């Protein structure tokens, strides 16, 4: 399972490096996880090399909060107009709400998968 990170409708991972796939969402989206912003900037691995085969390369962004704004920096992908996007800004409340929503959806998905994979032995 991979995390897809979209900014303004653009897949940041795919547009940054097509060899990459987003890391496991249970790692990235968990409460207090690496995408949760802090006053001190932190580097976050968000994707790993998958093509042509799994490898050591990583896609890393810097995440921080300044006031009521979350900032992702160290980006390098083409925007819709072809200009390079180096930084993205998000409203803090909306950003945290979206991470919470995505994590809740992930938990629901994992629960439904475990329900369908449940083994019930038959009585003899």
Image: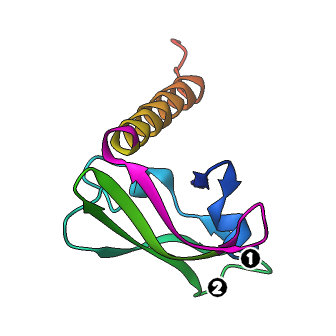
Q: Residues within 10 Å of mark 1 (few under 14, many from 20)?
A: some
Q: Residues within 10 Å of mark 2 (few under 14, many from 20)?
A: few
Q: Are marks 2 and 1 in contact (CB under 8 Å)?
A: yes
Residue 117 picture quarter: top right
> Which region shows up in magenta?
77-94
Residue 79 in the magenta stretch? The answer is yes
- Residue at which label 2 appears: 55
Where in the figure is residue 59, as x and y percent of width and height? 55, 77
- Residue at which label 1 appears: 19
Judge from the rendering whether residue 25 lies leftward or rightward of residue 39; answer left or right: right
SS at mark 1? loop
Q: 45 or 89: which is nearer to us?
A: 89
Where in the figure is residue 118, as x and y percent of width and height? 53, 26
Q: Is residue 20 visible?
A: yes
Q: Is residue 24 above or below residue 47?
A: above
Judge from the rendering whether residue 33 lies leftward or rightward of residue 51; answer left or right: left
Where in the figure is residue 81, as x and y percent of width and height? 78, 64
Residue 37's disc number: none
Q: Is residue 30 above or below residue 53?
A: above
Q: Is residue 1 visible?
A: no
Judge from the rendering whether residue 37 lies leftward or rightward of residue 48; answer left or right: left
């Amino acid at each position: 399972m991979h995390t897809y990170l979209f900014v303004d409708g653009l897949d940041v991972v795919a547009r940054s490096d097509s060899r990459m796939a987003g890391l496991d969402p249970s790692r990235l989206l968990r409460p207090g996880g690496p995408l949760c912003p802090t006053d001190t900037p932190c580097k976050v691995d968000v994707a790993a090399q998958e093509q042509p085969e799994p490898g050591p390369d990583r896609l890393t962004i810097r995440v921080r909060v300044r006031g009521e704004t979350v900032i992702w920096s160290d980006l390098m992908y083409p925007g819709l107009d072809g200009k390079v996007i180096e930084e993205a800004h998000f409203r803090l409340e909306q950003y945290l709400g979206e991470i919470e929503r995505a994590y809740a959806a992930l938990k629901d998905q994992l629960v439904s998968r475990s329900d369908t994979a449940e083994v019930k032995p038959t009585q003899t």
